[in-house]
Image (cartoon, grey):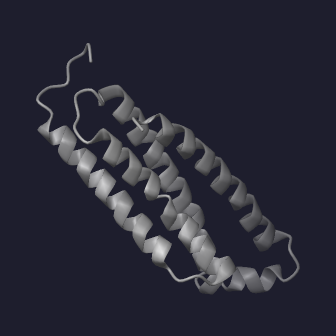
Amino acid sequence: MNGKNNIAIGFLTMGFFMAYGFLLIYLRDFAPGKEEWANSYSLGKHFETRLAHVHGNLFALLNISMGYLLLRFGSQLKHVKIISALALAGLLMPIGILTEVYFGLPPVLVLIGAIAMTASVVWLGLAFLKLKQITASS
């Protein structure tokens, strides 16, 4: 894992959560009971599904960005595999929100994913701070 998987899985995850957005549009505008769904905008399942949609796309974009940086500067950075794995594990957060909503599972995956993504972002930031110099030929 040197970043390539982050980019590939990031794009696939983004595609999934973009498609999931179409489901949310359907529920809001076309499904039977759409008024009830729209009225529960900031409550319960409606709120949770929007959180999953937003965080899924955000975390996918973070994986794409981090994957590119890990590929580009991986030879100059330390702990590339760990950072990559943590960023991918971060995708457990939005998946965990969906498992809560649809299967009633506890929020364990949400917490694991949130911690993993935060750790990967901070770790990569520290790795770049420790980088001596970024040269044009890198």
Q: Could you say where residue 63 lies in the image, as x and y percent from the top left?
A: 45, 46
Q: Could you say where residue 40 lies in the image, as x and y percent from the top left?
A: 67, 85
Depth check, front residue: 130 or 23: 130
- State the quadrant of the C terminus: top left
Left or right: 133, with 104 as reference point = left
The answer to whether residue 138 of the structure is visible from this angle is yes
Q: Is residue 66 above or below residue 49?
A: above
Depth check, front residue: 128 or 43: 128
Q: Could you say where residue 85 lies in the image, as x and y percent from the top left?
A: 40, 49
Q: Is residue 67 above or below residue 121?
A: above
Left or right: 19, with 60 as reference point = right
Residue extending farthest to the right is 32
Rendered image quadrant of residue 32: bottom right
- State the quadrant of the N terminus: top left
Depth check, front residue: 100 or 134: 100
Left or right: 69, with 103 as reference point = left
Total count of labels:
0
Residue at point 20% right, 18% down? 135
The answer to whether residue 51 of the structure is visible from this angle is no
Residue at point 38% right, 54% down? 86
Left or right: 25, with 94 as reference point = right
Q: Is residue 116 above or below residue 41?
A: above
Residue at point 24% right, 15% down? 136
Q: Could you say where residue 28 lies in the image, as x and y percent from the top left?
A: 76, 72
